[in-house]
Amino acid sequence: MTDSLVRLRGALREFARDRDWDQFHSPRNLATALSVEAAELLEPFQWLTDEQSRNLQPAARAAVEQEIADVLLYLVRLADKLGVDLEQAAFAKIARNEGKYPVEKARGSSRKYDEL
Amino acid sequence: MTDSLVRLRGALREFARDRDWDQFHSPRNLATALSVEAAELLEPFQWLTDEQSRNLQPAARAAVEQEIADVLLYLVRLADKLGVDLEQAAFAKIARNEGKYPVEKARGSSRKYDEL
Amino acid sequence: MTDSLVRLRGALREFARDRDWDQFHSPRNLATALSVEAAELLEPFQWLTDEQSRNLQPAARAAVEQEIADVLLYLVRLADKLGVDLEQAAFAKIARNEGKYPVEKARGSSRKYDEL
Amino acid sequence: MTDSLVRLRGALREFARDRDWDQFHSPRNLATALSVEAAELLEPFQWLTDEQSRNLQPAARAAVEQEIADVLLYLVRLADKLGVDLEQAAFAKIARNEGKYPVEKARGSSRKYDEL
């Protein structure tokens, strides 16, 4: 079966084409919208403790799920417009992070790689 | 073959477990980190015109690709911690958006659904 | 003596005029830059506990101070471009918040006004 | 007359004390809330052209004015909690920017100082 990220890309292309929205979907506009959605996703967490954030009320969790979806949709769309292969970029980043955060140095620390 | 989002989730679980990082990965912390990465993704676009953003220089495009990957990694991780099925949430959101933005009303307009 | 916000506005007007930067300072661009700076201000806090955030190391505190300044500079500039009187807008907002968060209902609660 | 930033700081201290909100106002929480408000300020601009952003409709402009105020309130509060003198920090940053962006090199360019 076709991969989910590829199917999402196709569905969003069709969605935009049907509405003649490609004119609005410059990378700049999409990056801006993505950033706004990421803040909407952060909003319900802003006064919660870490512990509370692990136990969201059903209404908050449902709202968060929709914001997560919004971020993914803009991300897929932005990657498409820039010709970025999301899957490949993500796995390449994990490989890079393995180099920056070797297990023996990074274990149990939240410090940045240049402060380890 | 296993879907890319499922494989990413698995790779990130292993990455965190190897480093004992689950203690830092509260939903609140992950939502915060995601928001910071989204702004880093926006940063290279901030003084560009729409047209310039469609024709990034190679160095800028490579940087943007890495920031896109960072956003996806935190998004996959946050969804995992909240038990959100990313693929299902994304397609459910597209279906909802089809209801909010009917083709005949939304065509060629960048207005919000409640202002169409 | 002239108020600090008025002096900042004047200094930033001069800074932009000397560099012929008014062409870049559309409200949209300034709001984008401000949002990017706000995320840079958030970045050093992202893995800290509340308690740690109250006791920043000197290097972190100095970095945070500069990011706070960046946010204020873009905010003063954006308000100027939109003809917003920052001081008046801020005190008007406090008055509005007093109505939304009456002392007797809001005491000790971090809930939003529509959930009190 | 007392400077506006000092009066705002005093009004916000009183507001928080009356509601017993100092417990929620860790620097981390305030930086998060500020970042969320900055995105709310960006939201009305996300699909506008630069030109449209210079000519906001009255309703949009009024909404933007309130978001600008929200950002300033959290910024004043965060600076207070960290012991940062906002006015001094802002003028120090302008002086630093003058060094990073000399008039003769920066004129008419939107490039970052390290790319001038």
Image (spheres, coloured by chain):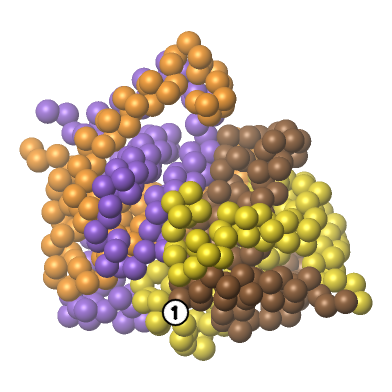
Chain colours: A brown, B yellow, C orange, D purple
Pick the quarter of the image with the C terminus of chain D: bottom left
Q: Is residue A43 visible?
A: yes
Residue A36 position, x and y percent, is 51, 56
Q: Residue at point 56% right, 79% down?
A: A81
Q: Residue at point 24% right, 42% down?
A: C86
- Would you place residue D85 above or below residue C71 in this image? above
- Considering every residue shown, the one lying at the far front of the view is B104
Q: Which residue is mark 1?
A: B53
- Would you place residue A17 above or below residue C77 in this image? below
Between residues A89 and C63, which one lies in front from this camera angle?
A: A89
Amino acid, disc 1: Ser
Pick the quarter of the image with the N terminus of chain D: top left
- Considering every residue shown, the one lying at the far right of the view is B1
- Considering every residue shown, the one lying at the far left of the view is C1
Residue C50 position, x and y percent, is 59, 37
> Disc 1: which chain?
B
**Label 1 crowding class (10 Å Cα cut-off): few <14, some 14-19, many 20+?**
many
Between residues D33 and C99, which one lies in front from this camera angle?
A: C99
Q: Residue at point 40% right, 69% down?
A: B46
Residue A53 position, x and y percent, is 70, 39
Residue A90 position, x and y percent, is 71, 73
Snapshot quadrant of residue B6: bottom right
- Considering every residue shown, the one lying at the far top of the view is C104
Snapshot quadrant of residue D7: top left
| Count of numbered labels shown in the rendering | 1
